[in-house]
Image (cartoon, rainbow, N blue to C red):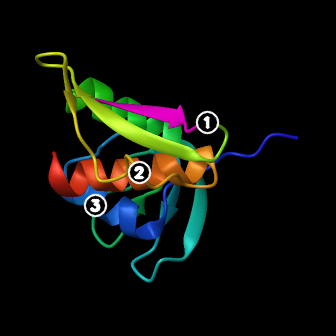
Amino acid sequence: MTTEDFVTFPTARLLKEKGFNTPVTCYYNADGTSMRSEPEYNWNVGPFFSKPTLQTACKWLREEKKYFIDIHNWSGEGYTYEFVDLRNIHHLPSNNCCRPLPTYEEACEEAIKYCLERLV
């Protein structure tokens, strides 16, 4: 059984602040409770926050903001990330280079948040 991994509420708030407007089927209420809807809709209106999957958020950063998130397995000890600025194919440093995270999903979430706070 596959499960989808979604951004956290704090990251959803940052995405809204930075202009994320991709239709999704999940959203957060203003109090952080998670809801689901059909069909897809841009929930970043009023007191709501779109709740995209980690993959959807990464794709939006890549296609709209031109930042590619590259997740690495650090010698089997965890995952790290770095960024590529696609406007000039330049690797950007992150503060994660020496601190591996236990799962790919945790590294992805942290990388999205870092990118939104410091690069976008």
Q: Residue at x 61, y 58 (%)?
A: 36
User: How far apart are labels 3 and 2 at the CA level?
Assistant: 25 Å
Q: Pointers 3 and 2 in contact (CB under 8 A)?
A: no
Residue 112 place in picture, x, y as percent: 37, 48
- Residue holding disc 3: 14
Q: Residue at x 23, y 40 (%)?
A: 93
Task: Please state which amino acid type lies under the numbered disc 1.
Answer: Ser
Q: 88 or 29, which lies in front?
A: 88
Marks 1, 3: nearer the viewer: 1
Total marks shown come to 3
Marks 3, 2: nearer the viewer: 2
- Residue holding disc 2: 98
Residue farthest bottom in this picture: 31
First along the sequence among labels 3 and 2 = 3
Task: Please state which amino acid type lies under the numbered disc 2.
Answer: Cys
Q: In the rendered image of this protein, does residue 108 appear above or below residue 72?
A: below
Q: Pointers 1 and 3 in contact (CB under 8 A)?
A: no
- Residue holding disc 1: 75
Q: 117 or 35, which lies in front?
A: 117
- Magenta stretch: includes residue 108: no
**Most common SS among magenta residues:** strand
Quadrant of the rendering where the N terminus is positioned: top right
Residue 67 place in picture, x, y as percent: 25, 31
Q: In the rendered image of this protein, does residue 113 appear above or below residue 84?
A: below
Q: Residue at x 67, y 39 (%)?
A: 76
Residue 4 place in picture, x, y as percent: 67, 45
Q: Please tell me how crowded label 1 is: few (under 14), some (14-19), or many (20+) other residues with Cα within 10 Å.
A: few
Task: Please state which amino acid type lies under the numbered disc 3.
Answer: Leu
First along the sequence among labels 1 and 3 = 3
